[in-house]
Amino acid sequence: MVLNRALALKRSAVALTPVAGALAFPLIVPVVLMRFGLPAAMLSAVLIGTGWFVVMLRTAEMPGHH
């Protein structure tokens, strides 16, 4: 039961990570651009993109090496 719940949680994370990044990036960067200016928007874009990339790699379902 616990294993099934952990597997379901991992599958949810794998499914939601691309969607979360695809929605967060275009929503956050323009708001930061309008409120704080271009340098802050560029920094937020780099940080969001890097964080998204790392999370995508951490949650990727890779085949095992046999």
Image (cartoon, helix red, strand yellow):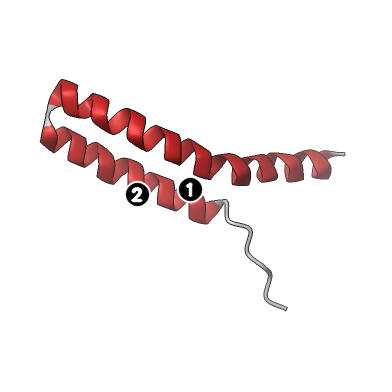
- CA separation in Å, label 1 and label 2: 9 Å
Q: Is residue 27 left or right of residue 4?
A: left
Residue under the point 34% across and 34% down: 26
Asked which quadrant contains residue 38, the reply is: top left
The image's mark for residue 50 is 2
Q: Residue furthest bottom?
A: 66
Q: Amino acid at mark 2?
A: Thr
| Left or right: residue 7 compared with residue 36 | right
Residue 7 versus residue 31 in the image, above or below = below
Q: Quadrant of residue 6?
A: top right
For the residue labelled by badge 2, is the local secondary structure a helix, a strand or a loop?
helix
- Left or right, 65 with respect to 39, comes to right
Q: What x and y, as percent, mark residue 19? A: 51, 39
Evaluate if marks 1 and 2 touch, with contact meaning CB atoms under 8 Å apart.
Answer: no
Secondary element under disc 1, as helix, strand or loop, is helix
Above or below, 52 against 23 in this view is below
Sequence-first disc among 1 and 2: 2
Q: Give the residue displayed 12% in from the left and 37% down from the top.
A: 39
Label 1 CA crowd tier, 10 Å (few <14, some 14–19, many 20+): some
* Figure quadrant of residue 13: top right
The amino acid type of the residue labelled 1 equals: Val
Outermost residue to the right: 1
The residue positioned 57% from the left and 51% from the top of the image is 59
Tag 1 residue: 55
Looking at this view, name the residue that lies furthest to the top. Answer: 35
Image point (82%, 43%), residue name: 4
Horizontal and vertical percent for residue 45? 27, 41
In the rendered image, the quadrant that contains the N terminus is top right
| Residue 5's disc number | none
